[in-house]
Amino acid sequence: MQFYAAPFASHALTCRQSKPHTLNLYTHLAKGVISRHAVDAAPGFEDSSGNAMPDVKQFLKQFPPLVSLVRATRAWDQQRRQRRRRSPAMYGPLIRDYLQSHALRKLQIGSGPHALPGWLNTDYEPVNDEFAFLDATRRFPLEDQTFDRVFNEHIIEHLSYGDGTFMLRECHRVLKPGGRIRIATPNLKKFVDLYTPDKTELQRRYMQTAIEQFYPEPKTNTECFVINNFLHLWGHLFVYDPPTLRDALERAGFTNVTEHAPGISEDDHLRGLESHGKQIGDDLNNFETMVLEATRPQTSNSASP
């Protein structure tokens, strides 16, 4: 996340203590708001040539009207970007082009930066114009019975139970009869089982990795720290176990619910999709992640309320 970014087009600055920032001071220099001498003399930043540039936050505090202007413009720019990102004019052509060019249509929800070839990749915060905007807690901007496959990985646990079940009903709605959904999400039971006195080697290694990364000081009841870290540090709102996710899928109208290991599927189009193992390692991902697949029946069931 950027420490500071003003929405004026840009003069690149690199701070010794933080990530790159952008700020265009030239408009204000031209108006005489800030003197060139003051900019040249201010410490804290260097440009690509090693020339001194100002510590932006501290420097701007010397000019209250400019601070107010920057804040107001930044807020306006953020709102403009959000409106543009969520506008049908922005993502509509991308969705339309995908549907027209793919006979087998596959939808990924919550793609992040992980685009799947041959899929319509969507996210709440698309990383570029190759991803479509989709809010999983609102009605999808997609027609009924449009897709053959739907996939999401480590998404549903970031939604409340109510929002998660709504997302499943929307997935059911946009799938064609006979279409399949695949969901990868943490398995709560794996974490509850950490309290077993006779831990497996993988359980011990998972706990050791979590403690070393997030709680390096000595601890006694490490299970408690590992579980709390998992439940709260990553913005998880509702973590499922297999029976609860199976029930949610069936209530949404799905049938033929099956459980798989990450990367494994009897369906060629749903095999090898998960990327979470690239971040934490395949063995640790296999420990914490469950994968369920389900089918929208040919004669669709009515979703339970």
Image (cartoon, helix red, strand yellow):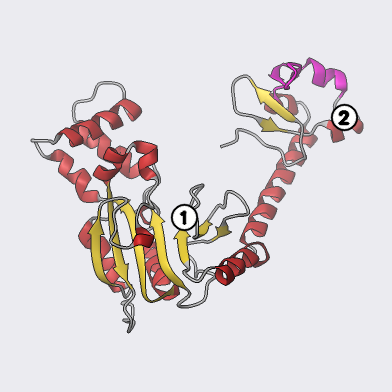
- Residue 126 placement, left or right of 171: right
Q: CA distance from mark 1 to mark 2?
A: 43 Å
Element at label 2:
helix
At mark 1, the secondary structure is loop
Q: Is residue 5 visible?
A: yes
What residue lies at 32% left-to-right and 84% top-to-bottom?
299
Quarter occupied by the N terminus: top right
Q: Residue at x 67, y 37 (%)?
A: 5
Instruction: Pick whichever, 112 or 79, lies toward us.
Output: 112
Q: Nearer the viewer, residue 117 or 159?
A: 117
Instruction: Give the residue number, with chain letter if any, for mark 2.
Output: 29
Q: Is residue 241 above or below residue 55?
A: below
Front: mark 1 or 2: 1
- Foreground: 206 or 103? 103
**What residue sits 16% from the left and 44% below the top?**
193
Which residue does the numbered mark 1 point to in the structure image? 110
Disc 2 marks a residue whose amino acid type is: Leu
Q: Is residue 54 magenta?
A: yes
Q: Is residue 297 a member of the stretch shown in magenta?
A: no
Magenta segment boundaries in residue numbering: 35-55
- Labels 1 and 2: the sequence-earlier one: 2
Q: Residue at x 42, y 75 (%)?
A: 173
How far across and down, in percent of the image, does residue 204 sit? 19, 32
The local crowd at label 2, few if under 14, some if 14 to 19, many if 20 or more residues have their Cα within 10 Å, is: few
* Tag 1: amino acid: Gly
Residue 211 in percent (x, y) is at 28, 29
Q: Position of residue 118 (x, y in %)?
A: 50, 60
Q: Quadrant of residue 228?
A: top left
Q: Position of residue 101 (x, y in %)?
A: 57, 68
Q: Is residue 161 visible?
A: no
Quadrant the C terminus occupies = bottom left
In this view, which residue lies farthest toward the left?
198
